Amino acid sequence: MSYIDELLEIGTSTWLDDLSRDRLTSGNLDAVRAEKSVVGVTTNPAIFAKAMSAGTAYDAQLSELKAAGADVDEAVYAMSVEDVRHACDVFKEVYERTDGRDGRVSIEVDPRFAADEQRTIEQAKRLWELVDRANVMIKIPATDESLPAITAALASGISVNVTLIFSVERYAQVIDAYKKGLDQAAANGHDVSTIHSVASFFVSRMDSEVDKRLETIGTEEALALRGKAGIANARLAYQLFVKNFLQTRDLPEGGHKQRPLWASTSVKNPDYPQTMYVTELAGPYTVNTMPEDTIDAVLEQGGLHGDTLTGFAGEAKEVFDALEGVGIDMNDVVQVLEREGVEKFVDAWQELLDSMRENLK
């Protein structure tokens, strides 16, 4: 049994945070599924921008789209949808074997719509129809404007990956949006047992921002707190998950728990252990989406030491108290991260559109 299998026994599913046409056509994605115990895939605008700007794997489809007169938005999403549909087929067996819990492949709404509730809803429904696979998840950011879109998508029977969550306070709003959406789905006549959702917390980005501020403060007390904020934040979020989904049962009949998903789990600081956002965030009913380098590090190094989420909220609260004690404004940290998170995806998407626009001329 591999360390990834051991992680699954603890309760954490491993999803690959990457997708490309090359992975699909070469059989690499199927091999990763079979040989590395990966049970799902996530994508984002930056991943597709990287995939489509390298090599020639998309050239044939791009030529067809050009001949058909597709505009740049249509072309980019047609290629993205094709990849996601194919990946859904690769993971169909996992989806069926786990009753829909895993075997999921995520595709994100246009990040430029993050502040536009109606366009987010419309595109979520459109992507759901275009991919046309039961195991797809539509990624919607947890911005103020998109929270109602999350509820509306779920109410339409769509499985949703809520992304770009940076604070426990925002996560509480996401849980509320999820429960409202599931209630509305049941009222609308949907079989809620077919609807699944994850709530994606970004971990390493929290440490990158907080560590930068701690280094500016520069005291011994501040520097000792580097590398602790991201894990503490996730553990506090897990406490909220336990309260809302394990200690309380207020979902419609057949409704599923919305699992926490740990995203941005490759370390940005080379001084930190490569697997720290895996070994320290292992626990029941969770997902960890990793780039393949991190998956390989877990497979090689292990380091797992059981459930590191349950019962750790008190320790996590002490970390946050200490951060505030040395002068870290966590509310400002979260606001910066959410704004930059959307901006980074918008920038990546815009670069991809600009590149494809030239190719379609």
Image (cartoon, rainbow, N blue to C red):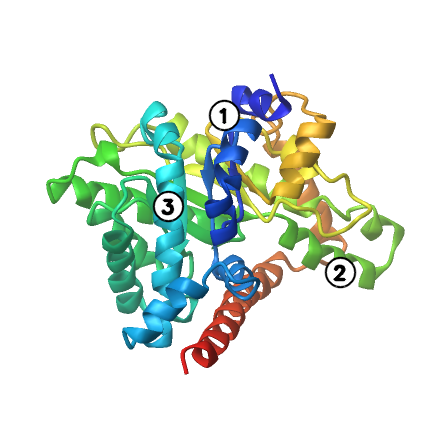
Of tags 3 and 2, the one toward the viewer is 3
Q: What residue is pinned by disc 1?
A: 284
Of tags 3 and 1, the one toward the viewer is 3
Residue 154 as seen in the image, left or right of residue 197? left
Residue 356 as seen in the image, left or right of residue 117? right
Residue at the location (46% across, 47% down)? 25
Q: Is residue 217 above or below residue 101?
A: below
Is residue 114 in view from this perspective?
no
SS type, badge 2: helix
- Residue type at mark 1? Pro
- What label does residue 179 carry, if any? none
Tell me which corner region of the image, top left, top right, bottom left or bottom right, holds residue 197. Answer: top left
SS type, badge 1: loop
Residue at the location (27% across, 73% down)? 68
Q: Earlier in the sequence, mark 1 or mark 2?
A: 2
Tell me which corner region of the image, top left, top right, bottom left or bottom right, holds residue 341. Answer: bottom right
Residue at the location (50% across, 28% down)? 34
Give the crowd class for mark 2: few <14, some 14-19, many >=20 residues within 10 Å: few
Separation of disc 3 and disc 2 at Cα? 40 Å
Across and down, in percent, residue 233 comes to: 60, 44
Q: Earlier in the sequence, mark 3 or mark 1?
A: 3
- What label does residue 86 carry, if any? 3
- What label does residue 212 carry, if any? 2
Residue at the location (44% across, 79% down)? 357
